[in-house]
Image (tube, rainbow, N blue to C red):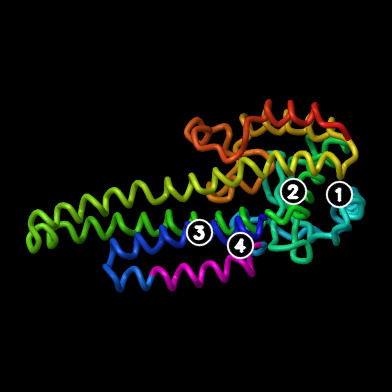
Amino acid sequence: MNNFRAWLLMGLLTILLVLIGNKVGGQSGALLFFLIALGMNFFGYYFSDKIAISMTGSQPLAEHEAPELYDIIRNLAARAGLPMPRVYRTPSPQPNAFATGRNPANSAVAVTDGLMQMLNRTEVEGVLAHELAHIKNRDVLVGTVAAALAGAITMIANMLQWGLIFGIGRDNEEEGGSGLLGLAGTFLMIILAPIAATLIQLAISRTREFQADATGARIAGRADGLASALLKLERAASRIPMQVNPATSHLFIVNPLSGEAFARLFSTHPPIPERVKRLQQLRI
Protein backbone atom coordinates (compact mmCIF):
# COMPACT_ATOMS: atom_id res chain seq x y z
CA MET A 1 0.00 0.00 0.00
CA ASN A 2 2.80 2.42 0.90
CA ASN A 3 4.61 1.65 -2.36
CA PHE A 4 1.41 2.68 -4.14
CA ARG A 5 1.34 5.89 -2.09
CA ALA A 6 4.94 6.61 -3.05
CA TRP A 7 4.16 6.31 -6.76
CA LEU A 8 0.96 8.33 -6.34
CA LEU A 9 2.92 11.06 -4.59
CA MET A 10 5.53 11.07 -7.34
CA GLY A 11 2.76 11.37 -9.91
CA LEU A 12 0.98 14.26 -8.21
CA LEU A 13 4.12 16.28 -7.65
CA THR A 14 5.29 15.50 -11.19
CA ILE A 15 2.04 16.99 -12.51
CA LEU A 16 2.76 20.12 -10.49
CA LEU A 17 6.23 20.37 -12.02
CA VAL A 18 4.84 19.92 -15.54
CA LEU A 19 2.26 22.66 -14.94
CA ILE A 20 5.01 24.98 -13.76
CA GLY A 21 7.08 24.11 -16.84
CA ASN A 22 4.14 24.80 -19.14
CA LYS A 23 3.65 28.19 -17.50
CA VAL A 24 7.34 29.03 -17.90
CA GLY A 25 7.93 27.86 -21.48
CA GLY A 26 4.78 26.37 -23.00
CA GLN A 27 4.99 22.84 -24.40
CA SER A 28 8.78 22.83 -24.49
CA GLY A 29 8.89 23.97 -20.87
CA ALA A 30 6.39 21.29 -19.85
CA LEU A 31 8.51 18.61 -21.58
CA LEU A 32 11.69 19.90 -19.94
CA PHE A 33 10.15 19.90 -16.47
CA PHE A 34 8.63 16.45 -17.10
CA LEU A 35 12.12 15.12 -17.83
CA ILE A 36 13.41 16.87 -14.73
CA ALA A 37 10.62 15.26 -12.68
CA LEU A 38 11.47 11.80 -14.04
CA GLY A 39 15.10 12.31 -13.10
CA MET A 40 14.14 13.53 -9.63
CA ASN A 41 11.76 10.61 -9.07
CA PHE A 42 14.46 8.12 -10.06
CA PHE A 43 17.06 9.83 -7.90
CA GLY A 44 14.60 10.25 -5.01
CA TYR A 45 13.62 6.57 -5.10
CA TYR A 46 17.10 5.07 -5.15
CA PHE A 47 18.84 7.65 -2.98
CA SER A 48 16.04 8.59 -0.58
CA ASP A 49 18.15 7.81 2.49
CA LYS A 50 21.10 9.92 1.32
CA ILE A 51 18.78 12.81 0.43
CA ALA A 52 17.23 12.90 3.91
CA ILE A 53 20.58 12.57 5.64
CA SER A 54 22.04 15.38 3.56
CA MET A 55 19.05 17.71 3.93
CA THR A 56 19.08 17.36 7.74
CA GLY A 57 22.86 17.69 8.14
CA SER A 58 23.07 14.31 9.87
CA GLN A 59 26.41 12.55 10.33
CA PRO A 60 27.38 8.87 10.77
CA LEU A 61 27.48 7.72 14.39
CA ALA A 62 29.88 4.87 15.22
CA GLU A 63 28.95 2.20 17.77
CA HIS A 64 31.79 3.08 20.14
CA GLU A 65 30.43 6.65 20.30
CA ALA A 66 26.95 5.54 21.42
CA PRO A 67 27.00 1.88 22.59
CA GLU A 68 23.72 2.17 24.55
CA LEU A 69 21.92 3.62 21.53
CA TYR A 70 23.22 0.82 19.31
CA ASP A 71 22.15 -1.76 21.88
CA ILE A 72 18.60 -0.36 21.96
CA ILE A 73 18.29 -0.22 18.16
CA ARG A 74 19.78 -3.69 17.68
CA ASN A 75 17.35 -5.27 20.17
CA LEU A 76 14.32 -3.46 18.74
CA ALA A 77 15.31 -4.32 15.16
CA ALA A 78 15.54 -8.00 16.11
CA ARG A 79 12.07 -7.86 17.71
CA ALA A 80 10.68 -6.19 14.58
CA GLY A 81 12.36 -8.71 12.27
CA LEU A 82 14.42 -5.99 10.59
CA PRO A 83 18.10 -5.77 9.67
CA MET A 84 20.20 -3.36 11.72
CA PRO A 85 19.83 0.10 10.15
CA ARG A 86 22.67 2.56 9.77
CA VAL A 87 22.81 5.04 12.64
CA TYR A 88 23.31 8.81 12.36
CA ARG A 89 23.32 11.80 14.68
CA THR A 90 21.62 15.08 13.81
CA PRO A 91 23.47 18.01 15.41
CA SER A 92 20.70 19.69 17.40
CA PRO A 93 19.96 20.09 21.12
CA GLN A 94 16.27 19.54 20.38
CA PRO A 95 15.31 15.92 21.17
CA ASN A 96 13.98 14.31 17.99
CA ALA A 97 14.56 11.44 15.58
CA PHE A 98 13.70 10.22 12.10
CA ALA A 99 14.10 7.17 9.86
CA THR A 100 14.74 7.03 6.15
CA GLY A 101 15.46 4.61 3.30
CA ARG A 102 13.50 3.03 0.48
CA ASN A 103 13.35 -0.41 2.15
CA PRO A 104 14.58 -2.20 5.30
CA ALA A 105 17.84 -3.24 3.61
CA ASN A 106 18.66 0.39 2.80
CA SER A 107 17.42 2.09 5.95
CA ALA A 108 18.88 4.51 8.44
CA VAL A 109 17.86 5.98 11.79
CA ALA A 110 19.01 9.41 12.94
CA VAL A 111 18.73 10.85 16.43
CA THR A 112 19.46 14.37 17.56
CA ASP A 113 22.03 15.13 20.24
CA GLY A 114 19.24 16.11 22.62
CA LEU A 115 17.32 12.82 22.40
CA MET A 116 19.60 10.72 24.61
CA GLN A 117 20.14 13.63 27.00
CA MET A 118 16.48 14.42 27.76
CA LEU A 119 14.74 11.02 27.65
CA ASN A 120 15.12 7.95 29.83
CA ARG A 121 15.81 4.53 28.32
CA THR A 122 12.15 3.47 28.18
CA GLU A 123 11.23 6.67 26.34
CA VAL A 124 14.18 6.34 23.94
CA GLU A 125 13.08 2.78 23.19
CA GLY A 126 9.58 4.06 22.42
CA VAL A 127 10.90 6.70 20.03
CA LEU A 128 13.24 4.32 18.22
CA ALA A 129 10.55 1.64 18.00
CA HIS A 130 8.35 4.25 16.30
CA GLU A 131 11.11 4.95 13.76
CA LEU A 132 11.68 1.26 13.12
CA ALA A 133 7.92 0.96 12.60
CA HIS A 134 8.23 3.45 9.74
CA ILE A 135 10.88 1.20 8.22
CA LYS A 136 8.82 -1.95 8.81
CA ASN A 137 5.74 -0.32 7.27
CA ARG A 138 7.89 0.79 4.31
CA ASP A 139 6.61 4.34 4.43
CA VAL A 140 9.87 6.24 4.96
CA LEU A 141 10.31 6.31 1.18
CA VAL A 142 7.06 8.25 0.87
CA GLY A 143 8.24 10.95 3.24
CA THR A 144 11.66 11.33 1.68
CA VAL A 145 10.33 11.54 -1.88
CA ALA A 146 7.83 14.12 -0.68
CA ALA A 147 10.60 16.15 0.93
CA ALA A 148 12.76 16.09 -2.21
CA LEU A 149 10.01 16.96 -4.69
CA ALA A 150 8.26 19.52 -2.50
CA GLY A 151 11.58 21.23 -1.88
CA ALA A 152 12.28 21.30 -5.62
CA ILE A 153 8.84 22.72 -6.40
CA THR A 154 9.35 25.47 -3.85
CA MET A 155 12.76 26.26 -5.35
CA ILE A 156 11.34 26.40 -8.87
CA ALA A 157 8.50 28.64 -7.70
CA ASN A 158 11.12 30.99 -6.30
CA MET A 159 12.88 30.97 -9.67
CA LEU A 160 9.59 31.91 -11.30
CA GLN A 161 9.57 35.08 -9.25
CA TRP A 162 12.71 36.23 -11.02
CA GLY A 163 11.24 35.26 -14.39
CA LEU A 164 8.19 37.34 -13.54
CA ILE A 165 10.36 40.34 -12.66
CA PHE A 166 12.49 40.23 -15.80
CA GLY A 167 9.69 39.24 -18.18
CA ILE A 168 6.96 41.62 -17.08
CA GLY A 169 7.80 44.53 -19.37
CA ARG A 170 8.22 42.48 -22.54
CA ASP A 171 5.05 40.46 -22.01
CA ASN A 172 2.93 43.56 -21.48
CA GLU A 173 4.33 45.31 -24.54
CA GLU A 174 4.07 42.41 -26.96
CA GLU A 175 0.91 40.68 -25.82
CA GLY A 176 -1.24 43.35 -24.21
CA GLY A 177 -4.16 41.90 -22.27
CA SER A 178 -3.14 38.32 -22.86
CA GLY A 179 0.24 39.17 -21.38
CA LEU A 180 -1.43 40.43 -18.25
CA LEU A 181 -3.41 37.20 -17.99
CA GLY A 182 -0.19 35.24 -18.38
CA LEU A 183 1.46 37.25 -15.66
CA ALA A 184 -1.52 36.68 -13.37
CA GLY A 185 -1.31 32.94 -14.02
CA THR A 186 2.41 32.90 -13.27
CA PHE A 187 1.85 34.86 -10.09
CA LEU A 188 -0.79 32.37 -8.95
CA MET A 189 1.55 29.49 -9.76
CA ILE A 190 4.28 31.06 -7.62
CA ILE A 191 1.89 31.18 -4.67
CA LEU A 192 -0.09 27.98 -5.15
CA ALA A 193 2.59 25.48 -6.23
CA PRO A 194 4.45 25.34 -2.88
CA ILE A 195 1.13 25.25 -0.99
CA ALA A 196 -0.13 22.36 -3.13
CA ALA A 197 3.11 20.44 -2.59
CA THR A 198 2.80 20.99 1.16
CA LEU A 199 -0.84 19.86 1.25
CA ILE A 200 0.07 16.64 -0.55
CA GLN A 201 2.73 16.03 2.09
CA LEU A 202 0.24 16.67 4.89
CA ALA A 203 -2.36 14.28 3.51
CA ILE A 204 0.09 11.38 3.60
CA SER A 205 2.23 12.25 6.59
CA ARG A 206 -0.45 12.59 9.29
CA THR A 207 -2.04 9.17 8.75
CA ARG A 208 1.27 7.31 8.77
CA GLU A 209 2.24 8.77 12.17
CA PHE A 210 -0.73 7.12 13.89
CA GLN A 211 0.13 3.81 12.25
CA ALA A 212 3.80 4.06 13.24
CA ASP A 213 2.84 4.90 16.84
CA ALA A 214 0.75 1.73 17.12
CA THR A 215 3.31 -0.50 15.39
CA GLY A 216 6.14 1.01 17.41
CA ALA A 217 4.35 0.39 20.71
CA ARG A 218 3.95 -3.27 19.78
CA ILE A 219 7.63 -3.55 18.80
CA ALA A 220 8.67 -2.04 22.14
CA GLY A 221 6.16 -4.22 23.99
CA ARG A 222 4.63 -1.23 25.76
CA ALA A 223 2.95 2.06 24.85
CA ASP A 224 3.73 4.19 27.89
CA GLY A 225 7.35 4.86 26.90
CA LEU A 226 6.39 6.38 23.55
CA ALA A 227 3.45 8.29 25.06
CA SER A 228 5.68 9.85 27.71
CA ALA A 229 8.37 10.63 25.12
CA LEU A 230 5.92 12.40 22.81
CA LEU A 231 4.85 14.75 25.57
CA LYS A 232 8.47 15.58 26.42
CA LEU A 233 9.40 16.04 22.76
CA GLU A 234 6.50 18.40 22.14
CA ARG A 235 7.45 20.60 25.09
CA ALA A 236 11.09 20.63 24.02
CA ALA A 237 10.28 21.47 20.40
CA SER A 238 8.32 24.54 21.52
CA ARG A 239 11.27 26.01 23.41
CA ILE A 240 14.40 24.62 21.71
CA PRO A 241 14.77 25.81 18.09
CA MET A 242 16.04 23.45 15.42
CA GLN A 243 17.66 24.62 12.21
CA VAL A 244 16.16 22.30 9.62
CA ASN A 245 14.86 22.53 6.06
CA PRO A 246 11.03 22.83 6.39
CA ALA A 247 10.68 20.29 3.55
CA THR A 248 12.08 17.60 5.90
CA SER A 249 10.04 18.47 8.99
CA HIS A 250 7.53 15.67 8.39
CA LEU A 251 10.29 13.04 8.61
CA PHE A 252 10.79 13.61 12.34
CA ILE A 253 8.74 11.91 15.05
CA VAL A 254 7.66 15.34 16.33
CA ASN A 255 7.47 18.45 14.16
CA PRO A 256 10.81 20.21 14.81
CA LEU A 257 9.25 23.54 13.80
CA SER A 258 6.30 23.32 16.19
CA GLY A 259 7.55 26.34 18.09
CA GLU A 260 6.87 28.58 15.08
CA ALA A 261 3.29 29.87 14.88
CA PHE A 262 3.12 29.79 11.07
CA ALA A 263 4.53 26.25 10.95
CA ARG A 264 1.75 25.03 13.24
CA LEU A 265 -0.82 26.07 10.63
CA PHE A 266 0.67 23.55 8.21
CA SER A 267 1.82 20.91 10.68
CA THR A 268 2.79 17.61 9.10
CA HIS A 269 2.01 15.78 12.35
CA PRO A 270 -1.29 15.01 14.08
CA PRO A 271 -1.77 16.67 17.51
CA ILE A 272 0.35 15.10 20.26
CA PRO A 273 -2.61 14.79 22.70
CA GLU A 274 -4.50 12.73 20.10
CA ARG A 275 -1.46 10.51 19.51
CA VAL A 276 -0.99 9.98 23.26
CA LYS A 277 -4.70 9.23 23.71
CA ARG A 278 -4.59 6.54 21.04
CA LEU A 279 -1.47 5.02 22.57
CA GLN A 280 -3.12 4.86 25.99
CA GLN A 281 -6.05 2.98 24.46
CA LEU A 282 -3.84 0.34 22.84
CA ARG A 283 -3.92 -3.22 24.11
CA ILE A 284 -0.37 -4.60 23.85
For marks 2 and 3, give the CA distance.
Answer: 24 Å
Tell me the residue that label 3 is attached to.
Answer: 149
Please name which of the two marks, 2 or 3, marks the residue nearer to the observer.
3
Label at residue 51? 4
Amino acid type of the residue tagged 4 in the rendering: Ile
| Quadrant, the N terminus | bottom right
User: Which region is colored magenta?
Assistant: 33-48
Q: Secondary structure at mark 3?
A: helix
Q: Quadrant of residue 35?
A: bottom left
The residue that appears at 25% across and 52% down in the rendered structure is 185
Q: Secondary structure at mark 1?
A: helix
The reply to whether callout 2 and callout 4 are in contact (CB within 8 Å) is: no
Amino acid type of the residue tagged 1 in the rendering: Leu
Label at residue 111? 2
Tell me the residue that label 1 is attached to.
Answer: 69
Who is closer to the viewer here, 250 or 118?
250
Q: On the picture, is 153 further left or further right than 233?
A: left
Amino acid type of the residue tagged 3 in the rendering: Leu
For marks 2 and 4, give the CA distance.
Answer: 16 Å
For marks 1 and 4, give the CA distance.
Answer: 23 Å
